[in-house]
Image (cartoon, rainbow, N blue to C red):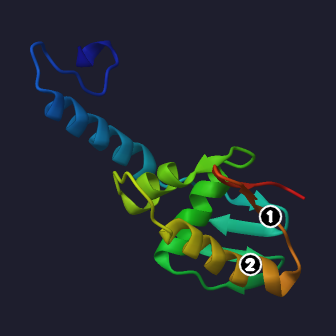
Amino acid sequence: GLDGGADDYITKPFAIEELLARIRVALRKKTTSPSSAILEAGTIRLDPVRRECWVASEPIELTKKEFDLLQYLMENKNIVLTREVLLEKIWGYDFEGETNVVDVYIRYLRAKLEEPFALKLIHTVRGVGYVIKDE
């Protein structure tokens, strides 16, 4: 039970909808707790608490979604993240099918972070998704 260290539990029998709702709540709790550490990838630095971003010492203005996407990519540096995972984690979509919203926001990030500074940190893994690598 809860005294044994669990965050939540469910008794049998249970409805699958209840289980899925509890999983979504647990995932939201995990992703909404702010990280106090400054994230770094190459010359990009991200402060999740202050919601500030810099390339070298230059401050970069990001929208909420751009910041959230960059933060998730940097927290999972060197891990290939699928478009579906990014849609679910950043936009909250439980989406099956085709959407290009992730691709559009990756393009926005590249325009703000990579192109002006001649960087290449966000890599496309064709047919899979995206990964941030230190170069």
Instruction: Please give the name of the residue rendered at 89% of the width and 79% of the height, measured from the top-left corner.
Output: 118
Q: Secondary structure at mark 1?
A: loop
Residue 134 or residue 38, whichever sits in front:
134
Crowding at label 2, few (<14), some or many (≥20) Cα neighbours within 10 Å? many
Horizontal and vertical percent position of residue 57? 81, 80
Crowding at label 1, few (<14), some or many (≥20) Cα neighbours within 10 Å? some
> According to the image, label 2 marks what residue?
113
- Ranked by sequence position, the earlier of labels 2 and 1 is 2
Up the image or down, 28 lies above or below 20; here it is below
Q: CA distance from mark 2 to mark 1?
A: 9 Å
Horizontal and vertical percent position of residue 69? 55, 64
- Identified by mark 2, the residue type is Leu
Instruction: Please give the name of the residue rendered at 59% of the width and 61% of the height, measured from the top-left corner.
Output: 71
- Identified by mark 1, the residue type is Leu
Left or right: residue 4 versus residue 124 is left
> According to the image, label 1 marks what residue?
121
Quarter of the picture holding the C terminus:
bottom right
Up the image or down, 57 lies above or below 131; here it is below
Up the image or down, 23 lies above or below 59; here it is above
Left or right: residue 33 versus residue 70 is left
Decide: marks 2, 1 in contact (CB < 8 A)? yes
Left or right: residue 115 versus residue 112 is right
Up the image or down, 69 lies above or below 27; here it is below
Would residue 51 be visible to someone looking at this image? no
Would residue 101 be visible to someone looking at this image? yes
